[in-house]
Image (cartoon, rainbow, N blue to C red):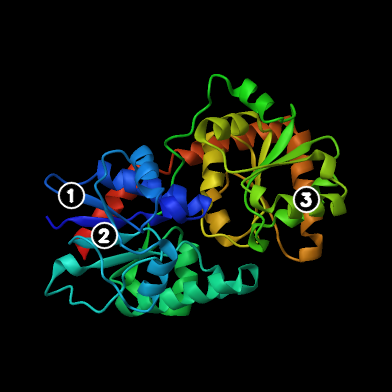
């Protein structure tokens, strides 16, 4: 069997959601590898890479590029695709050594990439211009050279097929709840150490326009008997608090950095409601984790979120942007005030989470490469 090289650099240098996806999928690919096969991780040059990957994926053989992340991304965008080792390539993002190759003559040359959302095409104004430019450039290379393009939902597949015409090269392989998150025995003490209140609404998100966090802060100005805990937006701490101040909710907003698994498990354990207000999304592992914790979930009607949630959450129409915060507030208020609704959503959430499996995702990756 031809060796499989997985681009794992997102674990070291990626955003929170993509980093977790890359870690979990790689772990699943290793766990489901057919007998006699070998999986190797590929990472950019970084002083943190060896330590972090040894901690997160112990035992995974690594091959490091001589280039740091920024230089490697620029080189691969320009078609300079020298890659250590031999074997098939599975990229957990668009960071991939895409080049002309003949898969029929050399099966080991096959390349699969992952595109996590279609926002760079459908709503580019919600992303930084540099992100849009790089994503579109790498997607053009994928359109020319990738043997398969993995996406997390059928909604993303439909958007990308319309934009890029990828046809049967598209494969839907979704994520699943984290395998490393659980309720720690000292959850209450951990929440206390983080300075969290007894009752709160939880969002795990950044401050980028696509996340809808600004709308959520405005919504919370209408819900005066609950605090809002935001995990993952500490890099924009001042901007978030400024927006919360403008909305009149700053005294009830707690902004936390990315948390370790035990602390994040404690925060999820203590939440009354989880809210996913994204204006655009491709999947949302954070929402799946909330489902796994049996949390009632309020989500926007972004198509990918609706696909993932099915009937396990309360959907809020984005519609007129000016009225979106009010609709979010009404939905949250309804869940907080209705014990029966909250219980129904909690049960539906736990049931929905059981339908997603990282092991299943790992097996689908191997099947994809076998099909190629």
Residue 14 left/right relative to 336: left
Disc 3 from disc 2: Cα separation: 42 Å
Look at 68% across and 37% down and name the residue there. Answer: 273
State which mark lies toward you, 1 or 3.
Answer: 1
Neighbor class of circle 2 (other Cα within 10 Å; few <14, some 14-19, many 20+) is some
Disc 1: which residue: 38
What kind of element bears circle 1?
loop
Residue 7 visible at all: yes
**In the displayed structure image, the side of residue 206 where residue 55 appears, left or right:** left
Closest to the observer, 176 or 158:
176
Contact, mark 3 vs mark 2 (Cβ under 8 Å): no
Residue found at x 81% / y 39%: 252
What residue sits 21% from the left and 62% below the top? 88
Q: Identify residue for label 2.
A: 368
* Sequence order check, earlier mark of 3 and 2: 3
Residue 83 numbered mark, or none: none
């Amino acid at each position: 069997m031809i060796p499989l090289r997985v681009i794992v650099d997102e674990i070291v240098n990626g955003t929170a959601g993509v980093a977790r996806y890359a870690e979990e999928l790689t772990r699943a690919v290793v766990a489901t590898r057919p007998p006699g096969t070998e999986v190797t991780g590929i990472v950019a040059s970084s002083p943190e890479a060896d330590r972090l990957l040894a901690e997160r994926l112990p035992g995974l053989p690594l091959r490091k590029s001589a280039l740091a992340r920024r230089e490697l991304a620029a080189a691969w965008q320009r078609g300079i695709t020298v890659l250590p080792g031999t074997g098939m390539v599975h990229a957990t993002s668009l960071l991939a050594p895409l080049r002309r190759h003949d898969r029929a003559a050399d099966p080991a040359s096959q390349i699969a990439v992952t595109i996590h959302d279609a926002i760079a095409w459908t709503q580019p104004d919600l992303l930084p211009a540099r992100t849009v430019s790089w994503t579109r450039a790498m997607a053009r290379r994928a359109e020319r050279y990738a043997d398969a393009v993995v996406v997390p939902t059928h909604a993303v597949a439909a958007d990308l097929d319309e934009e890029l015409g990828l046809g049967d090269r598209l494969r839907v392989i979704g994520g699943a709840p984290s395998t490393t998150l659980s309720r720690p025995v000292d959850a209450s003490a951990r929440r206390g150490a983080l300075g969290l209140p007894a009752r709160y609404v939880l969002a795990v998100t950044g401050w980028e326009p696509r996340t809808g966090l600004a709308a959520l802060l405005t919504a919370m100005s209408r819900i005066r008997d609950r605090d809002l805990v935001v995990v993952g937006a500490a890099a924009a701490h001042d901007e978030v608090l400024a927006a919360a101040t403008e909305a009149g909710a700053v005294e009830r907003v707690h902004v936390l950095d990315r948390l370790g698994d035990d602390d994040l498990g404690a925060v999820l354990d203590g939440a009354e409601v989880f809210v996913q207000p994204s204006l655009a999304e491709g999947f949302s592992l954070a929402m799946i984790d909330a489902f796994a914790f049996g949390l009632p979930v309020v989500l926007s009607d972004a198509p990918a979120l609706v696909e993932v949630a099915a009937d396990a959450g309360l959907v809020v129409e984005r519609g007129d942007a000016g009225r979106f915060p009010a609709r979010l507030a009404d939905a949250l208020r309804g869940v907080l005030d209705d014990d029966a609704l909250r219980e129904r959503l909690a049960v539906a959430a736990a049931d929905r989470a059981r339908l997603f499996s990282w092991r299943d995702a790992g097996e689908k990756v191997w099947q994809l490469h076998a099909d190629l």
